[in-house]
Image (cartoon, grey):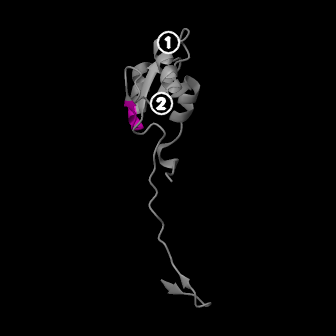
Amino acid sequence: MKQNIDDTEVILLSDSPRHLIHPFCDKRIVFTGALSSMTRMEAAKKVRDFGGILQGAVTKDTDFLILGNKRRGISSKQLKAEHLLSLGFNIQIMLEDDFLWVLSIPKDTLPTF
């Protein structure tokens, strides 16, 4: 603690460490439909590189369902995700273009509050 000229206390706080986290970090992710921009294996590797966890099926623990641009109609995975959403579970249904945008976010630019 320091005293300033007004004789009031001034508390100096050190900068708190910034923890950086990507939106996919520690999130469970499922793909449905074929991706137009990469193979499913490439997409899975990218998700894992950002700390994501791949799932084969939608469950109440799923965080993101990625809809590939080459999908044909509504898949059973999408129907299940929509049903779980209606029950109050927090599942983000994301189009492939939005998935690619999230992948473009560098790991080291996102502060956690």
Query: The disc labelled 2 sits on which kind of residue?
Result: Phe
Q: Which range of residues does the magenta coloring cover?
A: 48-53
**Can you identify the residue that label 2 sits on?**
89
Is residue 112 found left or right of 26 in the rendered image? right
Per the image, is 52 magenta?
yes
CB under 8 Å between discs 2 and 1: no
Closer-to-camera residue (40/57): 57
**Can you identify the residue that label 1 sits on?**
75
Query: The disc labelled 1 sits on which kind of residue?
Result: Ser
Inspect this view and state whether residue 1 appears: yes
Question: In front of the other: label 2 or label 1?
Answer: 2
Query: Considering only vertical position in the picture, is 72 above or below 13?
Result: above
At 50% across and 20% down in the image, what residue appears?
83
Query: Considering only vertical position in the picture, is 15 above or below 83?
Result: below
Per the image, is 3 magenta?
no
Q: Check disc 2 and report its element: helix, strand or loop.
A: loop
Q: What x and y, as percent, mark residue 39?
A: 44, 19
Closer-to-camera residue (103/29): 29
Q: What x and y, as percent, mark residue 89?
A: 47, 30
Residue closest to the far right: 6
Place residue 54 in its image quadrant: top left
At 53% across and 40% down in the image, what residue appears?
105
